[in-house]
Image (tube, rainbow, N blue to C red):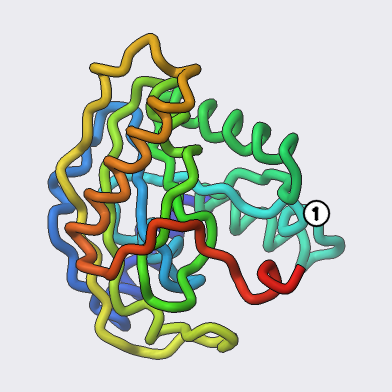
Amino acid sequence: MLHLMVRYALAPLAKAIYRPTVHGAELVPLDEPIILASNHRAAVDTALTAIVTPRPVSFLGKAEYFTGKGLKGRFMASLLSGLGYVPVQRGNAAAGLAALDSARKVLEAGGAFGIYPEGTRSLDGRLHRGHTGVGALALTTRSRVVPVAITGTEQVQPAGKRFPRRAKVTVRFGEPLDFSHYDGLENSSMARRAVTDHVMYAILELSEQEYVDKYHKRPDEKSA
């Protein structure tokens, strides 16, 4: 019920305020499991993708967001669930496997799952090397992948700012990518890397960002 309220009440309001420009939404399949793989510019990317995609989309959310106490905690958990977030622990290898398992369940149920292959927001505006989780998902679930490019959200909510502001935002959806020619190779690290690189190149063509062939690290990770 809350999901429907967000989609049919809050989404039109957000569109009216921010007026995102959307290209290629008709390319998103409506009746099959699909992975939406996007670049990541700002914290609002997830909400924006959910608003402009012509079908419900699930994303991973930090488990602690769902465990808050009191009325506020329960409301936040309900809101995130309504938005399609799937709670998952983060921070170690076991958490990574749990995240992939949660995503796989969404796809096996015929849903749409959103993922950021870079793993974190790009703080320098460039597109960075993708982690192979998207390749693993595509191969194990045999789902097609829709590349997505978001521009402008870094101006809506710059790093370090709590509240969004109005700015020109564009979302571009690409043609679904079919990796059925890799069937049977889901356990191959080379196949997962090849699929991931293909997805990242498709995002690059849509976003026209500068590409960096290395994983992106946030400042706190570099000093660790």
Give the farthest residue toward the right.
Answer: 69
Secondary element type, mark 1: loop
Q: Residue at x 68, y 62 (%)?
A: 76
- Where residue 183 appears, as percent x and y from the top left, is 33, 13
- Where residue 87 appears, as percent x and y from the top left, is 66, 45
Lateral position of residue 127 relative to residue 146, left or right:
right
Q: Which of these two is toward me, 29 or 148?
A: 148
10 Å neighbourhood of mark 1: few (<14), some, or many (≥20)?
few
- Where residue 205 appears, as percent x and y from the top left, is 18, 57
Task: Give the residue pinned by disc 1.
Answer: 67
Q: Which of these two is toward me, 223 or 196?
A: 223
Give the residue type that dot 1 points to: Thr
- Residue 181, by quadrant, is top left
- Where residue 81 appears, as percent x and y from the top left, is 59, 49
| Above or below 56: residue 166 | below
| Above or below 185: residue 132 | below
